[in-house]
Amino acid sequence: MASDRDPFDDTDRPGEEPNPLAEFMAQFGIRPGADGSVDLNELMGKLQQVMGQLSSQLGGFGGEGLNWAFVKDVARKVTAAQGADPSPTAADQRAIRDAVGLADLWLDQQISFGRLATTPAAWSRAEWVENTFDVWRTLVSPVATSLGAAITGLLGKQSAELGGLQPMMEPMMRAASSGMLSAQVGQALGLLSTDVLSACDMALPMTAKPVVALLPGNVARFGEGLEQPDADVRLYLALRETARQRLFAHVAWLGPQLLALVEHYARGITIDATAIEEAMESQLSGQVSPADLERLGETLSGTLFEPVQTPEQAEIMARLETLVALVEGWVDDVVGVTTASLMPGAPALLESVRRRRAVGGPTETALKQLLNLELRPRRVRDAANLWAALRTARGAEARDAAWAHPDLVPAVADLDDPLGYVERGRPAASPASPELGDLDADLARLLEEERGSGD
């Protein structure tokens, strides 16, 4: 039954529910007159003024997407706030090139995948943000779409109260919510830039083309307290990154499939519209500015998404974790056998990498904030043991040949039975999930397009 209460009356009355429309409008200085009446012409004028102010202050926020210039600006500010971030010096560049050159020389003897044509690079944190930004934009875009749908649903619930004002309120709400998400994305990327050691440190291909790039400042911080020479730490990380990038460069389906799995997971995200509404009511004022939105993004950090994971997302997560574990396990085996007789400190450095992986830190936090993704490849050790068993039984060529096609790569069941996989020479059979037919079709189409572009 519709309420007789004036929809623009925000007066508190005992026993009555607060009026969300009146409270929201009050944030922008729109209130009824002393007698409770509303001059519609004056109201429309104020709304147009607010919309004009919002457009000028948040210029670039689209109704369907994010202001990516603002995202990058927030990321750079967060990065700068974490301490000095100088551009790598000529000496830094030379040290990275020398480390990658030696890594290439050593890896040539141990893996089947050839060297990259790109020149090794040393990046600052800001350069990491810049060089990985396009991939992040692709991965986060489905979240922006889900946010738009949540805002539409939120306004739909209040349609009776909004009445004829909904066409004007919807773009305003979309712009403000897009600004909040933009701020949250920028904050997460800025913090992540202080933790990553290389271009592909997360076992996801984050650059348009494979390139071996290390972040000297973060590498130096990683080496603190390890009682290992700086040159050895740099070389060890160069070996890992070089092996990983060679794998992505020569296994055409691998990188696209990893990113496709992340995108499919992101498309299933559900936005917590209540959290958005509460945050806006508690913090937005009539003077909406980028600073307000940064504060809102921080407030919503970790609460923007519904904590519900669909069965399809759970299956995608299992696939993604297994594939990431296989990549990192392969890198562990390759680098382990490469350094066995050449770098006495390599086992200690591997344990440091494993501890860092187990803790998660800013990387895990960023993925949770950006994509509601808790990516914990818990079975990297099992994957490394499987690759080692295959190499021992059949040679390094057989280990690397298993990446030739997705159907040849070990399945999650093989991590429990590595010797069985070695004997069979193929993944253990696993029942297909009928819910994932669309996912498999999309992955197949994406990989076909990738092959076409490569040709």
Image (spheres, rainbow, N blue to C red):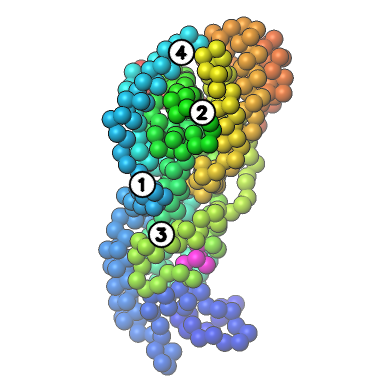
Amino acid type shown at disc 4: Trp
| Label 4 sits on residue | 106
Q: Residue at x 60, y 29 (%)?
A: 351
Q: Secondary structure at mark 2?
A: loop
Q: Which residue is mark 3?
A: 294
What x and y, as percent, mark residue 450? 41, 24
Q: Which residue is mark 2?
A: 228
Tell me the quadrant of the picture where the N terminus can be found. Answer: bottom right
Q: Residues within 10 Å of mark 1 (few under 14, many from 20)?
A: few
For residue 389, above or below residue 90: above
State which mark lies toward you, 2 or 4. Answer: 2
Kindly report the distance in space between the C-alpha atoms of the residues bearing marks 2 and 1.
24 Å
Question: Circle 4 sits in a helix, a strand or a loop, which is it?
Answer: helix
Question: From which residue to which does the magenta span run?
Answer: 276-280
Q: Image quadrant of residue 325?
A: top right
- Badge 2 amino acid: Gln
Q: Nearer the viewer, mark 3 or mark 1?
A: 1
Give the quarter of the image for residue 332.
Answer: top right
What residue is rendered at 47% in x and 41% in y?
195
- Residue at image coords 63%, 85%: 15
Q: Which mark is residue 84?
A: 1
Q: Do residues under tags 2 and 3 come within 8 Å of each other at their CB atoms?
A: no
Report the amino acid beneath label 1.
Answer: Ala
In the foreground, 60 or 301: 301
